[in-house]
């Protein structure tokens, strides 16, 4: 649905009772599914924030980081959203929380890429 | 998953983290296995380790089921008041889930905690609380009232302070695109909107207006973040009763958005302006200049999402001055867009606009034909009906309509034919049954069955105008022949995409073409015999054209020699024909339907049709020679081809029409083929509109499919006598054709005879009055056929009754009547059955809180759509759609129990009835 769209098109696509808001970073698409009455522009900002946080968390994030450390990116995501609602808007706070919980844990066992990966190398932040 | 559950119980933080993540990804709340976690989560929530508590709250917020939330509510509430903002915000979001899952009574504590929860400086907590506010607002309206007094002032203060904090931002403060924490601003404004949406103006709304004005003044539109905040402001201004000057500000902001370079912002502007117009009327836009041009520009954008909004908005701002441009854009939009819904929608818009602002009927005809040409299959039937009514009611546009439709639908291909010097009267080239692949595929993109159908119908119905617009009769006849030919093609690759649609469409096209053709001929022939000046000119026009090269016998020979491949089939059908006609001869019923003169010729015709099949045409000779009129002979020739059609309905009609065309029955022909009485355009239009509104108000379930459509059409034709030809008649035809063709295959003698008897005797005389009667009859017959009859039919006919529609009364009392209609899509094995319930209040008082419930056994699934109303006025009606699916179709019968509940408004008495729905064995 998102892939055939050109960069000149808007970042919102209708989908049944929901909207799909997406943002493209090089070859990576970040896709969020929102309610009909959500603020699309804000969702775009949130996606951007998520990417920025990932960027500083991994240090210049790339696709491979997300694939091989999908657990970590999910944890970061968990620090931003709970059940589709925004919980933290400060990048520094998110980062701190994510790193604190990493520190509390021993080195994470490495999971290889598995079937539950985000589809088509997209990291999908599904909101409700 | 079990691994995850085991890991949850581990003492190591790391294990827990992985386990919970795995659960959140793998499991959703419906899994029973989650229950095993409740205890584990409880322990974690009491853990001293901050990280573990937060983890548990995360899980709760993300995937907790109703039972889990209920069990763990005390813990959530405890953490709501935690001093640590990190824990508090997670507890807030966990309680969002609790509020969504649980009832109002169970979550009152959360409501009371709200002011305390907000008592913090952490923006993260504030943001989380806004989500909780939204959830509480959705839970109940009493919550809104309470929150309005308890929480709204605090939120307003937070927002105001936030605005005043200029320049004092600390390190963790988020600034995006020059806007201080847009997230917080947007979220607070949004929750304030929810709180004040339905409230009367008060001090607080004034405060709100002030703050909104401040926000709007302090925010730049350059960056997306700023737009997000402003967008939220605009939405709030529109839905809350605010100051008029603020509304102007809102419209201006939107207008500014329209030229933003970010497409998403433009999209939002279009959408928001549409909402504003819906709320405040078109007047609010008067002080924004150049808006219309911008909207028209947006309709041309490449992005379908944006275009859709632009069309919505454009439709609303259209008026007498810009209607022309607007319709042009809509037409372009139809051509450009790919989705069926979008096209259909645009068709409606053109129709409505044309109706409201259209300058003349000629203009309307013009636009309609163009819309039909570009939308074709997406053009709603209702609009077509209205259009036909428009033409039939206005004689002055008929000529124009016929000409436009002819050029649009039929002429292009005719041109090709003429260039190749194919004599119209020897159009045998097009009669070779299977078109070559090349020509087939070029024709594919051009095929527009619905347009063709309308064209053919209008041509037949208003044939008397043909000479005045300079159409050659032979050319027209050839067009008919070609379309008939095309309507028989069912296996071209391009059809696969929309196969079912094209098949029905094709069939209807064929039937319409046949009737149109005969009507056309009837006008020409009968006009001549009654010495009407117009028709004389038809003859005069037609005469010289084909006089010299007329050799009907020869062309007949060329055409009727059947391709070998089909010989067997044809023979079989010929026998059918024999049976039909033979029966007609013996049936008094048929005699009553038409003067005996029509039947005298039967053996003649029969002989010819049979001999045609065997390749010898001897007996046809005299018949063709008899008719001096070249039009008739050509028509007969075309019909003759169709008399061998593999489609039973078409074959039948062709034979009947052939009989009508015999010289002896000219007078009969004239009366049978008399034009439809003009339709009342206004009422047809009104009905079309109502139906559309009904459809948008109560979206029809997908499963309904063809059955619903047919029923719909039948209902129209029968109820009103309005007849956009082909539609109701063919609808009825399908019902008739179905059992007869099936029983043919089964070879059960009695059924076959009966069905065929029923078929021709009803439609021997397809005149207008007869058609209506026929529809009424079939309409009446279908629903009133008792269940027993259906059951026995399916018994003897080898299950042929399976696809039939059943209707039954579920419940009947002095005050209430509940009836149901069952139908399912074509395949008799289909598990899904659509059930349309209708409730009629027979009393003098209104019923409120009306609820109809159904229960099914375990092997069935039940999907009840919302009822059209929960209150039924005195004497009023309501309806409800239900989709049943029987997973053991064929093994176990469908069983239903029902319960009806309502409150008698006059006595406030609560009535409840229940029982078993009987007579469903046949399903």
Image (cartoon, rainbow, N blue to C red):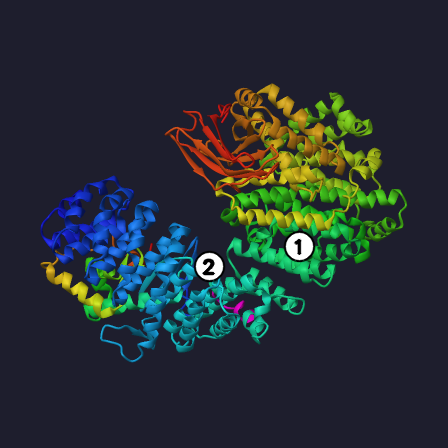
Q: Out of B467 and B341, give the one closest to the viewer.
A: B341
Residue under disc 1 on the same chain as residue under disc 2? yes
Given the image, what chain letter belongs to the residue carrying mark 2? B
Residue B409 is marked as 1
Q: Out of A60 and B78, give the one closest to the viewer.
A: B78
Q: Out of B687 and B578, give the one closest to the viewer.
A: B687
Q: Looking at the image, can residue B245 be seen? A: yes
Q: Residue at x 44, y 75 (%)?
A: B261
Q: Write down the quadrant of residue A120 in the picture.
A: bottom left
Q: Residue at x 16, y 53 (%)?
A: B18
As drawn, is B789 to the left or to the right of B207? right
Q: Looking at the image, can residue B561 be seen? A: no
Q: Is residue B297 magenta?
A: yes
Q: Which residues are magenta?
A: B296-303
Given the image, what chain letter belongs to the residue carrying mark 1? B
- Position of residue B272 measured from the top left corner of the image (x, y, whole percent): 49, 65
Quadrant of the image for the C terminus of chain A?
Answer: bottom left
Earlier sequence position, callout 1 versus callout 2 = 2
Around disc 2, counting alpha carbons within 10 Å, would you say few (fewer than 14), some (14 to 19), or many (20 or more)? Answer: some
Residue holding disc 2: B199
- Position of residue B602 measured from the top left corner of the image (x, y, whole percent): 76, 28
Around disc 1, counting alpha carbons within 10 Å, would you say few (fewer than 14), some (14 to 19), or many (20 or more)? Answer: many
Q: Out of B670 and B77, give the one closest to the viewer.
A: B77
Question: Does residue B758 lie above or below B442 as drawn?
Answer: above
Q: Write down the quadrant of residue B661 in the picture.
A: top right
Q: Residue at x 67, y 49 (%)?
A: B686
Quadrant of the image for the N terminus of chain A?
Answer: bottom left
- Position of residue B740 measured from the top left corner of the image (x, y, whole percent): 60, 28
């Amino acid at each position: 649905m998102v892939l055939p769209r050109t960069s000149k098109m808007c970042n919102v696509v209708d989908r049944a009772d929901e909207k799909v808001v997406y943002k493209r970073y090089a070859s990576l698409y970040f896709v969020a599914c929102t309610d009909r009455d959500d603020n699309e522009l804000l969702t775009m900002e949130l996606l951007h924030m998520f990417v920025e946080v990932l960027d500083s968390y991994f240090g210049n994030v790339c696709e491979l980081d997300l694939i091989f450390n999908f657990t970590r990116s999910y944890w970061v995501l968990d620090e931003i959203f709970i059940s589709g609602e925004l919980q933290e808007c400060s990048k520094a706070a998110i980062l701190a929380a994510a790193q604190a919980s990493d520190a509390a844990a021993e080195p994470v066992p490495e999971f290889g890429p598995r079937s539950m990966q985000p589809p088509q190398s997209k990291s999908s932040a599904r909101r409700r | 998953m079990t691994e995850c559950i085991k890991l949850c119980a581990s003492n190591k933080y790391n294990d827990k983290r992985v386990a919970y993540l795995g659960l959140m990804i793998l499991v959703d709340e419906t899994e029973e296995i989650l229950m095993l976690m409740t205890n584990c989560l409880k322990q974690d929530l009491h853990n001293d380790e901050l990280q573990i508590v937060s983890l548990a709250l995360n899980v709760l917020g993300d995937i907790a089921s109703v039972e889990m939330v209920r069990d763990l509510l005390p813990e959530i509430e405890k953490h709501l008041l935690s001093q640590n903002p990190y824990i508090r915000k997670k507890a807030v979001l966990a309680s969002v889930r609790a509020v969504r899952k649980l009832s109002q009574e169970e979550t009152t504590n959360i409501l009371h905690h709200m002011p305390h929860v907000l008592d913090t400086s952490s923006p993260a907590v504030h943001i989380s609380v806004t989500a909780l506010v939204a959830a509480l607002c959705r839970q109940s309206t009493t919550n809104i009232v309470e929150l309005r007094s308890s929480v709204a002032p605090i939120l307003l203060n937070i927002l105001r302070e936030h605005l005043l904090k200029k320049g004092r931002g600390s390190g963790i403060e988020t600034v995006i695109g020059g806007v201080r924490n847009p997230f917080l601003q947007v979220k607070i404004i949004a929750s304030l909107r929810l709180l004040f949406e339905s409230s009367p103006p008060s001090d607080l709304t004034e405060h709100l207006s002030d703050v909104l004005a401040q926000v709007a003044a302090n925010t730049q539109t350059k960056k997306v973040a700023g737009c997000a905040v402003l967008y939220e402001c605009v939405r709030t201004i529109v839905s809350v009763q605010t100051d008029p000057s603020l509304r102007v500000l809102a419209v201006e902001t939107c207008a500014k958005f329209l030229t933003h370079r970010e497409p998403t912002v433009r999209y939002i502007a279009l959408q928001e302006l549409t909402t504003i117009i819906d709320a405040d009327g078109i007047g609010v836009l008067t002080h924004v200049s150049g808006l219309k041009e911008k909207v028209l520009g947006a309709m041309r954008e490449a992005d379908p999402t944006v275009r859709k909004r632009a069309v919505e908005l454009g439709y609303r701002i259209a008026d007498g001055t810009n209607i022309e441009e607007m319709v042009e854009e809509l037409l372009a939009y139809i051509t450009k867009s790919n989705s069926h819904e979008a096209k259909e929608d645009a068709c409606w818009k053109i129709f409505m606009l044309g109706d409201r602002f259209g300058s003349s009927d000629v203009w309307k005809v013009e636009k309609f034909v163009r819309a039909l040409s570009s939308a074709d299959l997406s053009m709603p039937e209702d609009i077509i009906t209205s259009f036909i009514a428009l033409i039939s009611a206005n004689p002055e546009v008929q000529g124009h309509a016929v000409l436009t439709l002819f050029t649009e639908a039929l002429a292009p291909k005719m041109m090709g034919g003429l260039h190749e010097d194919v004599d119209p009267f020897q159009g045998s080239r097009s009669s070779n049954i299977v078109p070559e692949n090349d020509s087939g595929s070029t024709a594919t993109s051009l095929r527009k069955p619905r347009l063709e159908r309308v064209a053919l119908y209008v041509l037949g119905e208003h044939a008397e105008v043909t000479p005045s617009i300079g159409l050659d009769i032979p050319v027209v006849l050839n067009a008919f022949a070609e379309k008939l030919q095309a309507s028989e093609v069912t296996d071209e690759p391009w059809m696969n995409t929309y196969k079912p649609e094209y098949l029905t469409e094709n069939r209807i096209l064929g039937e319409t073409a046949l009737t149109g053709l005969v009507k056309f001929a009837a006008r020409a022939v009968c006009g001549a015999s009654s010495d009407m000046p117009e028709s004389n000119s038809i003859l005069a026009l037609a005469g010289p054209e084909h006089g010299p090269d007329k050799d009907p016998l020869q062309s007949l020979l060329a055409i009727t020699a059947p391709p070998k491949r089909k010989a067997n089939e044809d023979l079989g059908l010929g026998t059918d024909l024999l049976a039909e006609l033979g029966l007609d001869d013996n049936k008094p019923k048929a005699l009553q339907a038409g003067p005996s003169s029509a039947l005298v010729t039967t053996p003649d015709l029969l002989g010819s049709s049979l001999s045609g099949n065997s390749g010898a045409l001897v007996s046809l000779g005299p018949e063709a020679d008899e008719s001096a009129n070249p039009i008739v002979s050509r028509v007969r020739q075309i019909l003759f081809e169709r008399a061998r059609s593999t489609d039973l309905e078409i074959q039948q009609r062709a034979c009947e029409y052939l009989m009508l065309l015999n010289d002896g029955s000219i007078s009969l022909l004239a009366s049978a083929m008399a034009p439809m009485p003009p339709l009342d355009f206004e009422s047809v239009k009104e009905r079309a509109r109502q139906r559309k509104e009904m459809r948008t108000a109560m979206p029809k379930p997908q499963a309904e499919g063809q059955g619903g459509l047919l029923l719909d059409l039948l209902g129209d034709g029968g109820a009103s006598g309005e007849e956009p030809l082909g539609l109701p008649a063919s609808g009825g035809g399908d019902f008739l054709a179905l059992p007869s063709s099936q029983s043919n295959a089964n070879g059960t003698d009695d059924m076959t005879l009966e069905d065929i008897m029923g078929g021709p005797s009803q439609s021997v005389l397809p005149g207008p009055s007869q058609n209506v009667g026929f529809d009424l009859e079939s309409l009446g017959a279908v629903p009133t056929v008792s269940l027993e009859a259906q059951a026995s039919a399916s018994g003897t006919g080898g299950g042929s009754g399976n696809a039939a529609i059943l209707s039954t009364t579920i419940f009947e009392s002095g005050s209430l009547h509940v009836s149901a209609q069952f139908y399912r899509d074509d395949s008799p094995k289909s598990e899904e059955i659509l059930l349309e319930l209708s409730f009629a209040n027979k009393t003098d008082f209104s019923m409120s809180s009306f609820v109809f419930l159904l229960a099914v056994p375990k092997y069935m699934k039940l999907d009840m759509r919302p009822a059209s109303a929960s209150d039924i006025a005195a004497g009023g009606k309501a309806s409800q759609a239900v989709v049943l699916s029987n997973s053991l179709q064929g093994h176990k019968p469908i069983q239903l129990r029902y319960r009806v509940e309502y409150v008698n408004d006059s006595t406030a008495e609560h009535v409840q009835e229940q029982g078993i729905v009987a007579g469903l064995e046949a399903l």
